[in-house]
Image: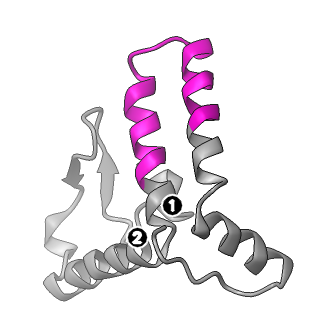
Amino acid sequence: MEWLVFLEPDPLGLLFKTHFRNKYVMLDITHVVADALVECTYKTARTFAKGPTKALGMAKKAVYEGLNMGLEQGLRVMCRMQGELMKSKDYQEGVAAFIEKRKPHFIGE
C-alpha cells in the first residue's frame, strides 16, 4: 500500500516486500539501528496523519475490494469512490492548494 502514498516505499533501504500483504523481511538485521527504525516508523505515521486520510482509507479499500472483482466492476467501484471523495473538504483543500501552489492542510473530512 505504500506506493499509494510514498515516492520512497523503503526509506531505510533495508526491507523488501514479500508476496504477503504488507509483510517485510529484514535483508541485513545487523545494520538496523533501533533509533533509525523508530524514526522511520514515526515518519511514516506522520505522513499518513498529515495526508488526506479519507482518501487514503478509500484507496486501501478499493485495492482490497478490487482483488476480488473484474476490471469493469473494479472501475465502477473506483468511479463511485472518486465521486464521493470529490464532495469532501479534503478534495476542495487539495485543489485549492494546488491552484495556489501551497502545501495542503487536510482535516480528514
From the top left corner, tell me how far across and down residue 10 is, in percent: 40, 63
- Which image quadrant is residue 9 in? bottom left
Check disc 1 and report the residue beneath it.
5
104 and 35: which is toward the camera: 104
Is there CB contact under 8 Å for labels 2 and 1? yes
Dominant SS type (magenta) = helix
Query: Against 93, is 7 above or below?
Result: above
108 and 32: which is toward the camera: 108
- The residue positioned 54% from the left and 27% from the top of the image is 77
Residue lying farthest right? Answer: 99
- Which image quadrant is residue 80 in? top right
> Tag 2: residue type?
Phe
Q: Which mark is residue 48?
A: 2
Which type of secondary structure does the marked residue at label 2 adopt? helix
Q: Earlier in the sequence, mark 2 or mark 1?
A: 1
78 and 64: which is toward the camera: 78
| Residue 70 among magenta residues | yes
Q: Which residues are magenta?
A: 57-80
